[in-house]
Amino acid sequence: MAYEVLARKWRPRQFDDVVGQEHVTRTLKNAIKADRVAHAYLFVGSRGIGKTSTARILAKSLNCEKGPTPEPCDNCDACREIMAGNAMDVLEIDGASNNGVDEVRGLRENVRYTPARGPYKIYVIDEVHMLTVAAFNALLKTLEEPPPHVKFIFATTEPQKVPATILSRCQRFDLRRISVRDLTARLELIAGAEKLDIDTDALLAIARGAEGGLRDAESALDQLIAFVGRKIREENVLSVFGLVARKTLDELVGTVLKGEIPRTIRIIAELDESGKDMQRLVVELLEYFRNILIYLYAGEGDGILDLSDEQLGILEAHAQSTDPERVLRIVNILTEVDGRLRYALSKRTILETALIRAGRAASVVSIDQVIEQINDIKKNGSMIDPGLSAKEKPQSSDPSVSGKDDVSAPTQSSTVTASRASDEPSEKELNILIGSWTELIDQISHAAPLARSCLIDSRPVMVQGHTVEIGFDPEFESHIENLDVPRNRNAIQRVIGSVLGRNIHVDFKLLEAGEKLPGDTEIKPAVKGEGENMKHGADLDENVQKATHAREKWLRDPSVRKTLEVFNGDIVDVRE
């Protein structure tokens, strides 16, 4: 006797044998019991999940000698002929090769004749969406009002291609993808009956590779038996089908969540060298992070997660080490790379780049976490509210920061007003900036560390209204290019603006040959020191001192120090 593949040998014979489609089989059994069988059915679903098998079982149930019955006997001539595919009253038609209007016209002529043996003549049309528009139109009238002895059963993987006029004349059943748990249980049953030595990890790997299709899983098991014999292990499945071991996938996800980028790159290199499919790896990573996200929001109840108990334990450990915002960022990155990977020449490079981004996204602190930590510091520490009045603010125990060292809001306001009112070049303000240039560079370097080395050889050369020019000797021309980036420019403008008491714009000027920087010559005091100008200069001197004292005062505050330690920050400006 010729060898029969497992997919045919273990094809369901009863409604109860159909795996994972209880919503369909239960409805059909109840319809048969109540004698409410429709004249046309449409089974929809992906490949290998039981559409044609369910159609055959329905045909057996209707034409069985003991029927119609929800449990056909499988022993009568009608049942055996239907299972063998040579029953005269059950015609299985391939819609892909019999899709013309002439074939449908012939079918329409034949439906008038009564069945040869059973009570019904049943037409099973597989891949019905392949019929032409003319063929569908020729079928419409017969499908709507067929003879009482005729039943139509259609099957398709693409229901969107079936005309609405056909859909409205059928009872539609959508078959689901079979869960990994159901696939594993079915494969375990087959392995036991076939006397195979196969471990649980191998069964899980086959079920993962089948993507919800039982026929694919049975075909894969058949192929593995031919490859390694009756003793099958997970590594055999992985080597044949290019899948990634579950433990390796667990480790890879863990490295991404922890931001361990070097280890992530090494794992990808090992998988690529062993010939694993990078596209398939992205799909599995997406599913893994989706499971983490679902667990974080919905837990493991109600069977939402199609995982074993061991996998749930590992998933729970990963979920406890992260938060939904980070996982969402990772899912977005993987979704983007999944589309790019289909057309990429170097898939490994694209995937490595994506996982590096995912690792960084997993380690970045979210806004919610920042707010939560600041709230904790406020709650547990003694955060000072800058909006409090001078009397309400806590007094420092250090006498050097009490009394006159507090910055006065009216003084600051008057300084800002006076400064903004003048659009003439201010030699006094320029002298103040030059005199405190070293301290200002220190403050700038806190926000822009790379700016320090470029500013050391520069000096302010002009202050006019809201513009401050900083000059450079011709030999340091490259420093201007390094400073003229948003991070450095913003830091310089912020620090100088805090001294002058207004928003300013910085221009970088390259001096002419032989021209000296202001710091290289004697700085002359302000000429014609009218009362208002002298007062304005004194205010600026006082502002510099007050800003320094205010910064020192806040640095001594325990809650401020704790905040700076948490976020590795520094005080750039104090505004009270």
Image (cartoon, rainbow, N blue to C red):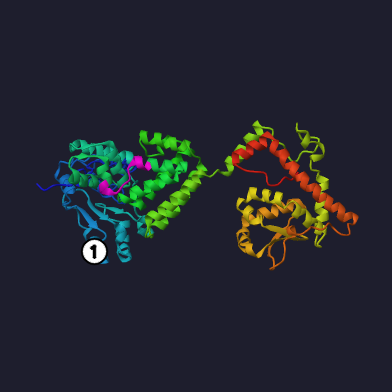
x and y, in percent, of residue 330 in the image: 47, 47
Q: Where is residue 2 drawn, in percent x and y?
A: 11, 48
- Residue at 60 percent across and 59 percent down: it is 482
> Where does the magenta region start and end?
239-249
Mark 1: amino acid: Glu
What is the secondary structure assignment of the residue under circle 1? helix
Query: Can residue 174 be seen from the camera position used here?
Result: no
Tell me which residue sits at (41%, 52%) in the image. 351
Image location (x, y in percent) of residue 12: 23, 43
Q: Is residue 10 left or right of residue 432?
A: left
Residue 256 location, quadrant: top left
Instruction: Give the x, y percent position of residue 463.
Output: 76, 60
439 displayed left or right of 335: right
Does residue 87 sit above or below 196 in this rendering? below
Q: Which residue is mark 1?
A: 103
55 left or right of 463?
left
Q: Is residue 67 visible?
A: yes
Q: Residue at x 35, y 36 (%)?
A: 308
State yes or no: residue 201 in magenta: no
| Residue 244 falls within the magenta-colored stretch | yes
